[in-house]
Image (spheres, helix red, strand yellow):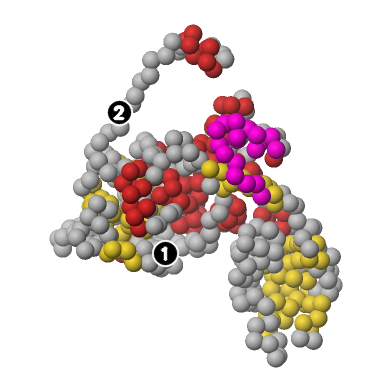
């Protein structure tokens, strides 16, 4: 599990150095396996716009790009070989003089064409190992913005190992809360807003839990008028630093909330879900065990033959997800998606562990569900994602929360003497 120091600082007010934070994490029982410093980039790296990108004669991949970087002398000529380079895109330009590790950007000549800079990939600026193409910034990014401002640099990424008994530390907020308690630092939590506006027309959905011992709680919220688009740059950068690839605003929001709250979510394309019966008003979501000889085509593009002990999230006919592990390609969010079902659930950790191990599928979702997550967290997680879907996917809430909760997790009370509390913790207990 990777965490960004800058992202953590949104929830924890501190001025800790990297070494001090490493020490604090370790003495909170969180093993720090590695740290990655992401230093400040040279000021010669700025946002720019590719005005034209023309093929260079005699080359099968090089393009001559004229780049607008608000330079008083006009457009800058840059030769680029990235497959995704095209006219009109916003990019990160490294101007002459920039030093990126062992590479110093100089005036160069490729295929006889002069180049006065470089268009950068994520690997070249140290953001990730991705180098399949140059960075494409959102189209509304202003020209001339420092790369440090764009990517929240400098920063440090800590790679952590969370023990199975500390599921409360599987998200940024849990880690911030633990450090706040240990170090006496102020905790800043995002406000979870209640839903006040709904779509004019509600969407129907049949939701049923057939295996309550394996899925004590499963909530669903429906959305309409969803617009699939790239996520805001800050959200994309947060995911990249935490080891995930941005996909689209809806998928990125579910991943962002998972990392923040420590509780996974999943989004289904509502229109790809099937009815259970022909006369049903809408599609179905059924939590059940796999049927004999049932197969599953996962998001990783692999097919799996399911066992009858595997738990699935099915529509009225077929598995739409391997519960708590991975979704199906058949119900995945696509650029054409306009209506979605947002899942926030709790599963039996042993069931998730058996399924993940048998099918050799490890995901960020299974990593968390294997460590036992509280059913009570499903509501907060769903509300947080709802707020972001409204803000960044133009979604309209098209249903009340559907929340069958067959096995209510009753509150547990622990008797504790105030004198023992004070001796153990170090300060008096507020008996009120």
Residue visible at 58% across and 56% down? Answer: 240
Image quadrant for the C terminus?
A: top left
Task: Name the residue: 43% across, 54% down.
Answer: 362
The answer to whether any part of residue 9 appears in the image is yes
* Magenta stretch contains residue 28: yes
Q: Is residue 426 above or below residue 369?
A: above
Task: Locate residue 335: give its quadrant.
Answer: bottom left
The answer to whether residue 216 is magenta is: no
> Looking at the image, which residue is at 69% across and 81% down?
63
Depth check: give the residue in front, 219 or 139: 219
Q: Nearer the viewer, residue 341 or 218?
A: 218
Q: Considering the numbered disc 1 on the image, is that residue within a helix, a strand or a loop?
A: loop
Q: In front: 410, or 403? A: 410
For label 2, count other residues whose C-alpha is less than 10 Å away and answer few (under 14), some (14-19) or many (20+).
few
Residue 152 x/y as whole percent: 67, 51
Quarter where residue 331 is shown: bottom left
Residue 302 against residue 110 in the figure, above or below: above
For disc 1, the neighbor class at 10 Å (few under 14, some 14 to 19, many from 20) is few
- Residue 384: image tag: none
Reading the image, the residue beneath label 2 is: 410
What residue is disc 1 on?
300
Q: Position of residue 238 (x, y in %)?
A: 58, 51
User: Rounded to the nearest whole Å, what is the CA distance between mark 1 and mark 2?
Assistant: 37 Å
Query: Which residues fall within the magenta stretch?
Result: 19-36
Q: Can you name the residue that lies furthest to the bottom here?
A: 58
Say left or right for 339 vs 27.
left
Outermost residue to the front: 358
Q: Picture quarter containing residue 90?
A: bottom right
Q: Position of residue 326 (x, y in %)?
A: 38, 56
Query: Residue 239: x and y, percent?
Result: 55, 53
Of callouts 1 and 2, the N-terminal one: 1
């Amino acid at each position: 599990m990777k965490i960004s120091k800058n992202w953590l600082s949104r929830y924890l007010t501190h001025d800790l150095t990297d070494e001090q934070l490493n020490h604090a994490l370790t003495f909170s029982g969180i093993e720090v396996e590695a740290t990655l410093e992401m230093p400040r980039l040279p000021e010669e790296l700025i946002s720019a716009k590719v005005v034209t990108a023309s093929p260079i004669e005699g080359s099968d991949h090089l393009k001559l790009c004229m780049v607008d970087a608000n330079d008083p002398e006009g457009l800058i000529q840059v030769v680029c070989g990235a497959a995704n380079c095209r006219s009109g895109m916003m990019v990160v330009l490294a101007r002459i003089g920039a030093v990126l590790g062992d590479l110093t950007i100089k005036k160069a000549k490729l295929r006889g064409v002069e180049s006065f800079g470089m268009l950068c990939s994520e690997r070249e600026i140290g953001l990730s190992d991705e180098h399949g193409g140059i960075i494409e910034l959102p189209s509304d990014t202003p020209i001339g913005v420092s790369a440090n401002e764009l990517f929240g640099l400098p920063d440090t990424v800590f790679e952590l190992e969370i023990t199975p008994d500390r599921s409360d530390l599987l998200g940024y907020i849990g880690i911030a809360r633990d450090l706040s308690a240990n170090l006496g630092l102020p905790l800043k939590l995002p406000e979870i807003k209640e839903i006040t506006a709904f779509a004019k027309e509600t969407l129907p959905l049949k939701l049923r839990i057939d295996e309550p011992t394996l899925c004590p709680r499963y909530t669903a919220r429906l959305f309409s008028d969803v617009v699939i688009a790239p996520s805001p740059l800050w959200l994309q950068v947060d995911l990249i630093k935490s080891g995930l690839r941005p996909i689209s605003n809806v998928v990125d929001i579910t991943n962002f909330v998972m990392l923040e709250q420590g509780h996974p979510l999943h989004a289904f394309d509502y229109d790809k879900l099937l009815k259970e019966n022909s006369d049903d008003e809408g599609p179905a979501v059924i939590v059940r065990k796999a049927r004999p000889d049932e197969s599953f085509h996962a998001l990783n593009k692999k097919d799996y033959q399911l066992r009858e002990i595997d738990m699935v999230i099915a529509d009225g006919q077929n598995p739409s997800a391997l519960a708590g592990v991975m979704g199906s390609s058949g119900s995945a969010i696509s650029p054409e998606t306009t209506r979605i079902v947002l899942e926030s659930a709790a599963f039996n950790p042993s069931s998730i562990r058996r399924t993940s191990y048998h099918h050799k599928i490890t995901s960020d979702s299974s990593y968390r569900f294997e460590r036992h997550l509280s059913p009570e967290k499903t509501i907060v997680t769903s509300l947080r994602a709802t707020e972001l879907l409204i803000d960044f996917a133009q979604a309209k809430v098209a249903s009340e929360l559907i929340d069958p909760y067959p096995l209510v997790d009753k509150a547990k009370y622990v008797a504790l003497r105030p004198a023992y509390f004070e001796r153990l913790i170090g300060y008096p207990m507020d008996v009120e």
